[in-house]
Amino acid sequence: MPLSDHVREWVSPQASMVEGALRLDAQAIRHRPLTLDASLTLRALAIAAMMIGAFWTARETFARGGIRTVVRAVCWTGLIVSIVAIATRYTTPTLLYGIWPSADGKTQVYGPFVNRDHMGTWLVLAIPLAVGYLAAGIVRRGSTVDAMDAISLWIGGAVCAMLAALVVSTSRSATVGVAVAAIVGAVLATNRHGARSRKWLLAAAVAAVLVFVSIPVSSQLLAKFDQLKDNATGSRRQIWIETLPIIHDFALAGTGLGTYRMTMLVYQRTEREILFNTAHDEYLQLAAEGGMLVGIPLLLAACALIAAIARRLRDDTSSGFWIRAGAVASLAGITTQNIWEIGLRMPANGMLFAIVCAVAVHEPQAASIRPKHTAADSWHSRGRKRTGGRREE
């Protein structure tokens, strides 16, 4: 929305300075929006609207069932993409899917993402969700032996493949995110079943360690954690320091969603061998691009989401609790990874994030929409119980 110069100078007093450094016609434009680039902000808003629409649609759909179907689709996708990503990593590292070259023909890509950390974001969301599905199957069928059908076996294989893809990516942020997700999942399991769940947690931890140590590249991932004190040009710490002046100068409305890269053309003080095109911290980048105008509504939405999740976890007594707990663990992991990355800005990651949020907060409404039972319906229901039939959530 175009604003007068008086209003714009009051809300974003440094905007004219940045535009004067970037545009030759800055002084000729009399009415401009708060964002420094309307086209970039419209693109960012389109992605945000897509995520919000996916969340509301998924939440309403899951209230009527279908969660397990969606989780299985995520697992199938994770299995296939992980295998392809690992294979192409060592055969055609600069080609997406082994077909399309990266922008400069030299940058190494990973799976469907140019940035391996963005692939890590998808895996952080998908792995705990899949583990929650496996746990729900065990609880629903009463024993591990009964739960080990063909579907559970290939989902277990998908989890192993995704863990392997995570290690091969050598993404430190994604590794920390999955570790946090595992801790949160363990806490939820312990609170639910106490000592009964400890042996399963121990077995899961041992399996994860075995997958990790069986991959030769795991030593490279561990070595990267030893480089955290690296102060070379382009380190995250330097990027964060140079982002703070943007947050200070655009505290009220930010520079506009999607405009961080162009703003850093003015604010970057480090040698320009490497351009800081992202803040490598979702929270700092949102503060720089959105200011209080975006930050306060997002904070309120996050508080509402946390409150809704707490209520659903407390009230859910079905086996579906474990899928919900897996989704909560995914959110905890991605919240942690966002300290070092901005992977949720990738549309594919944003869509999966929206679905995981919907799984975490959905409220089953099957009882309210189910038609009244007839005598025949009751007879069929008793028959299903005798034959061991189960209704899928």
Image (tube, grey):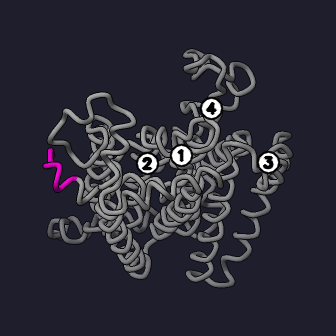
**Could you tell me how far apart the alpha carbons at marks 2 and 1 are, in whole angstroms?**
7 Å
- For image coordinates 46% across by 53% down, the residue present is 285
Do the residues under discs 2 and 1 have CB atoms within 8 angstroms?
A: yes
Residue type marked 4 = Tyr
Q: Which residue is mark 1?
A: 122
Q: Which residue is mark 4?
A: 110
Q: Which residue is mark 2?
A: 352
Do the residues under discs 2 and 3 have CB atoms within 8 angstroms?
A: no
Do the residues under discs 3 and 4 have CB atoms within 8 angstroms?
A: no
In the image, which disc is placed on residue 250?
none
Report the number of numbered marks: 4
Front residue (pair 118, 2) = 2
The percent position of residue 166, horizontal first and vertical second, equals 68, 45
Residue type marked 1 = Trp
Q: Earlier in the sequence, mark 1 or mark 4?
A: 4
- For image coordinates 64% across by 52% down, the residue present is 238
Q: Earlier in the sequence, mark 2 or mark 3?
A: 3
Nearer to us: label 1 or label 3: 3
Let me know if residue 73 appears in the view. no
**Could you tell me how far apart the alpha carbons at marks 1 and 4 are, in whole angstroms?**
12 Å
Magenta residues, start to end: 1-8
Residue type marked 2 = Leu
Q: Secondary structure at mark 1?
A: helix
Q: Quadrant of residue 33?
A: top left
Q: Earlier in the sequence, mark 4 or mark 2?
A: 4
Q: Quadrant of residue 62?
A: bottom left
**Could you tell me how far apart the alpha carbons at marks 2 and 3 are, in whole angstroms?**
28 Å
Q: Bin the neighbour count of mark 3 within 10 Å (Cα to Cα): few under 14, some 14-19, many 20 and up.
A: few
Horizontally, residue 5 falls left or right of residue 68, namely left
